[in-house]
Amino acid sequence: MTAPLLEVADLTCEFRDRGRTVHALNGVSLTVGAGETVGLVGESGCGKSTLARSIVRLLVPTSGRLLFDGQDYTRWGERRLRRLRKDVQIVFQDPMTALNPSWTVRRLLLEPLVLHRVGEPERRLSQVLDEVELPASVLGRRPGQLSGGQRQRVAIARAIAARPRFVVLDEPTASVDMSIRASLLRLLRKLQREEGLTYLFISHDLSTVRHICDRLLVMYLGRVVEEGRTESVFDRPAHVYTRVLLSAIPVPDPAVRRRRLPILGEPPSPTAIPTGCPFRPRCQMAAGECERPQPFYEVGPGHRAACRLARVEPSGEAGTPA
Amino acid sequence: MTPPLLVVEDLTVAFEGDPRPVLDHVGLTVPDQAWMGLVGESGSGKTMTALALLGLLPPGARVVGGRALLEGRDLLRLPPDELRRVRGSRIGMIFQSPRSALNPLMTVGAQIARAVRRGGYERKPERAALDLLRKVRIPDPEARAQAYPHQLSGGMCQRVLIAMMLAVRPRLLIADEPTTGLDVTVQAEILELMQGLQRETGMAILLVSHDLGVIAENCQRVAVMYGGGVVEDAPTDELFHHPRHPYTAHLMATLVRADRPVDLASVLPGARAEEPPGAGCRYAGRCPHVEAACLSRPVRLEPVAPDHGVACRRHAELAPLSLEVKAGTRGREEAS
């Protein structure tokens, strides 16, 4: 196996907030191979955006390691980070706040080209405009004069302008209308193929994730609780939280009746992390052993979950500690 | 069949100084004691429709035509103080940002108690407020009643508003994107509470949403808006499985859904309507089936079945519309 392009090892991230410690990430490990699209799903407060910001080093993690192409950049300073940022880019959820509203599209797109000293910036500019399927007529406009879909295309163009190798997409389709969503996903996939990009796709929208990701990681309260191939996770969710999450998605077909699995209590607070399985206080299936940290159990090829129900007893077939 | 609760006809709203109306002859029929969905993308006019019914249009916008009959009274022509009485007693409302709908300087318990008093039949509104908090499954209601809105999560605030609706028991609840921005597990719980509320009070719910999943699972009837008008209005099953308007068919074909994959390769480069020149069909700029005649005169909703309306002059010859996206249909670049 070739080395992964991105490796995150046992990452923790803590903040102080009004005298309390917020445990945003509690030992997250993941790898993303070159050319892959890995999805990161979870609900608000699970730490997915903190993880995104740590990976592009807008945040310095509390502990753990970040490696890109084998190089440890966890503690790099600004000067070396600039080199990293030519390769590692991010697209945020809301282009309205991510793009300078007083700049024209031309200036917005030229900035990364100049910053990363891309040769023949004008040529690359018109090329990248083509790649994101925007007409040249938008160059003179400002973000406020574009439609939501166009704005997000500008943000994507800015991210890929200097030809990065890795792009973190933080809820890239959350701000656009349903009829635009599918066309943005198609565009992202086309760009990946043509530019050889690798994606980490962060979303709370499981429908979107299903259509673009090769692999999925499910996060809960600062931890990865399940990971596997997308189809495998959707077909055979193993962690109780994953099952609850999947069962809560409304199905846009009146002929389909789904059964929602219950979830107990209230959304958790990252200031008070329970011992053992983080989902334990809200889990209907919680047992005494869930108070201890749960190992990952293999439930299929490359598919594992940190849930006692993912373990099959000695008499059974699947599920061994991984 | 019971008569509908609310009948909206030809509702037209325009901004001062803008000759083109933002709502153009909107027609809607909300059945009694049922869920009615109103879908459309941003800018299609769904929220504007809700605000017009409530008499809460933004400054500069006004109703220039049409009527909206609720229990025989035209909401669009009620004097302001009478409309205020109708609002909050006959018509309730919940919005996307529940926290901004609550008074930040009052505890949520006191706000529910005020709604109870307004409902007009409780001797001990404070105790009734606690019962209601319990009913919307707010844990530790005694403590939560003393909390201010900013101390509660968005999902919690939405529960408080639902508790207030339980106190007031309106005939019609207008819910504008009530779960947008909430996590899916919280969304599921809020929708379940609303189902309970609807069953218990027998109210009708007009659910404004861009989420076709939420619509499909809750509504018996759906109206689809596009460019300031209703393009199709039908029972939910019909609309999802046998759409008669090309825009509805496009929505169904490009749905990104979790329960099965769609073929992204078949999705055309992004398309956002350029407004058609002149008076024609509002979807003409994006429609794969457009003809010259579609551009020349307005297209209004007309019945294709007793309970199914479509605003397309070619609906008969196009039926049945394919729910697959075909190569060769017109893809226009998005334009703002």
Image (cartoon, coloured by chain):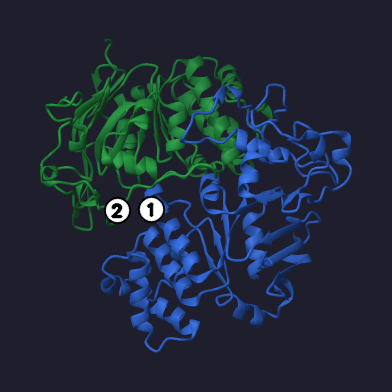
Chain colours: A green, B blue
Q: Is residue B280 above or below residue A185?
A: below
The residue lying furthest to the top in this view is: A1
Residue A176, label in figure: none
Q: Which residue is mark 2?
A: A267
The residue lying furthest to the bottom in this view is: B123
| Quadrant into which the C terminus of chain A falls | top left
Q: Note whether residue B336 is visible.
A: no
Q: Secondary structure at mark 1?
A: helix
Q: Note whether residue B106 is visible.
A: yes
Q: Callout 1 environment at 10 Å: few (<14), some (14 to 19), or many (20+)?
A: many
Residue visible at 27% across and 57% down in the picture: A265
* Left or right: B47, with A72 as reference point: right
Chain ID for label 1? B
- Which amino acid type corresponds to the residue marked 2 in the rendered image? Pro
Residue A199 in which image quadrant: top left
Q: Which residue is mark 1?
A: B186
Q: Is residue B140 above or below residue A209?
A: below
Q: Callout 2 environment at 10 Å: few (<14), some (14 to 19), or many (20+)?
A: some
Residue visible at 18% across and 49% down in the picture: A273
- x%, y% of residue B173? 56, 66
The answer to whether the residue labelled 2 contacts the one labelled 1, judged by CB atoms less than 8 Å apart, is yes
Residue B102 in which image quadrant: bottom left
Chain ID for label 2? A
- x%, y% of residue A279? 23, 46
- x%, y% of residue B178? 49, 58
